[in-house]
Amino acid sequence: MHGPSLPSVLKSKPATHDTTTTHDQLIAGLARVTSPQETPIYICAFQDCNRLFPSRERVMLHRKRDHNSDEDRDIITWNE
């Protein structure tokens, strides 16, 4: 594999309680199989950030704002 990759174990964060999902939504099922065309995923792997974004442009806005960087490497995606 070329380029960055995620570590096998990511840093943990406290979970928050879901107060919005209804019983009917749980019964109906919320998950399904998707594809890169339907669900773009871009991960900021800069300095072990590992935040998810829906586009490369959003990753770059995040990088500029939160990392003060214009570096366009260390982005993990299945869309390119």
Image (spheres, helix red, strand yellow):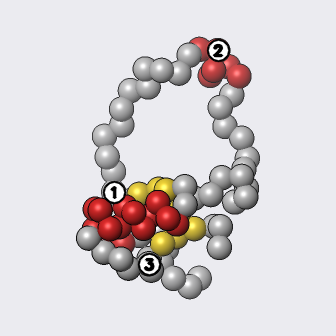
Q: Which residue is mark 2?
A: 24
Residue with the most extreme top position: 23
Instruction: Please identify the quarter of the rendering in which residue 27 is found.
Output: top right
In the rendered view of the protein, which quadrant contains the N terminus?
bottom right
Q: Quadrant of residue 23?
A: top right
Three-letter amino acid code of the residue under disc 1: Lys
Q: Amino acid at mark 3?
A: Asp
Picture coordinates of residue 42, whole percent (x, y)? 53, 63
Element type at mark 3: loop
Mark 3 burial class by Cα count in 10 Å: few <14, some 14-19, many 20+: few
Residue topped by disc 1 = 11
Distance from Cα at disc 2 to Cα at disc 1 = 32 Å
Q: Secondary structure at mark 2?
A: helix
Q: Which residue is mark 3?
A: 72
Q: Nearer the viewer, residue 4 or 58?
A: 58
* Dot 2 and dot 1 residues touching (CB under 8 Å): no
Q: Mark 2 belongs to which amino acid?
A: Asp
From the image, state whether disc 2 or disc 3 is nearer to you.
3
Does the residue at mark 1 contact the one at mark 3 (Cβ under 8 Å)? no
Residue 58 in picture, x, y percent from top left: 47, 60
| Most foreground residue, 60 or 37 | 60
Nearer to me, 61 or 25: 61
Label 1 crowding class (10 Å Cα cut-off): few <14, some 14-19, many 20+?
few
Element class at badge 1: loop
